[in-house]
């Protein structure tokens, strides 16, 4: 059985929020914050986090 990415739900929520709000990031800060929390908790376990960068520039937190 394939391994499901632990942060996929949050990544999809960001895409849905951005699409629904004409890509205005400021409207989606709550879902972006949830993605950051997931990436911090799943360091190295989430492919979704590999391209996700936060304002703190934590490049080594989500490397795969």
Image: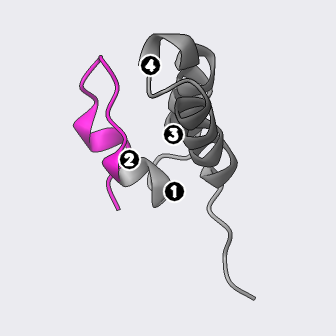
The answer to whether 5 is drawn above or below residue 20 in the figure is below
Of the numbered discs 4 and 2, the one sitting upstream in the chain is 4
Which residue bears the numbered disc 1?
46
- The residue carrying mark 3 is 39
The mark that comes first in sequence, 2 or 3, is: 3
Badges 4 and 2: C-beta atoms under 8 Å apart?
no
- 5 in magenta: no
Q: Residue at x 32, y 49 (%)?
A: 51
Q: Between residues 44 and 2, which one lies in front from this camera angle?
A: 2
Q: Position of residue 42 (x, y in %)?
A: 56, 46
Most common SS among magenta residues: loop
Where residue 26 sits: x, y (%)? 46, 11
Mark 4 vs mark 2: give the one in front: 4
Which residue has dot 2 on it?
A: 62
Which color scheme did the rendering employ for the protein?
Answer: one colour
Give the residues drawn in magenta, as a range: 51-64
Residue at the spot 48% in from the left edge and 54% down from the top edge: 48
Q: Which is more N-terminal, label 1 or label 2?
A: 1
Contact (CB < 8 A) between labels 2 and 1?
yes
Q: Which residue is mark 4?
A: 24
């Amino acid at each position: 059985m394939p391994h499901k990415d632990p942060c996929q739900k949050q990544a999809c929520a960001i895409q849905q929020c951005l699409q629904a709000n004409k890509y205005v990031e400021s409207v989606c800060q709550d879902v972006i914050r949830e993605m950051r929390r997931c990436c911090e908790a799943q360091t190295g376990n989430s492919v979704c986090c590999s391209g996700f960068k936060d304002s703190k520039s934590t490049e080594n937190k989500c490397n795969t």
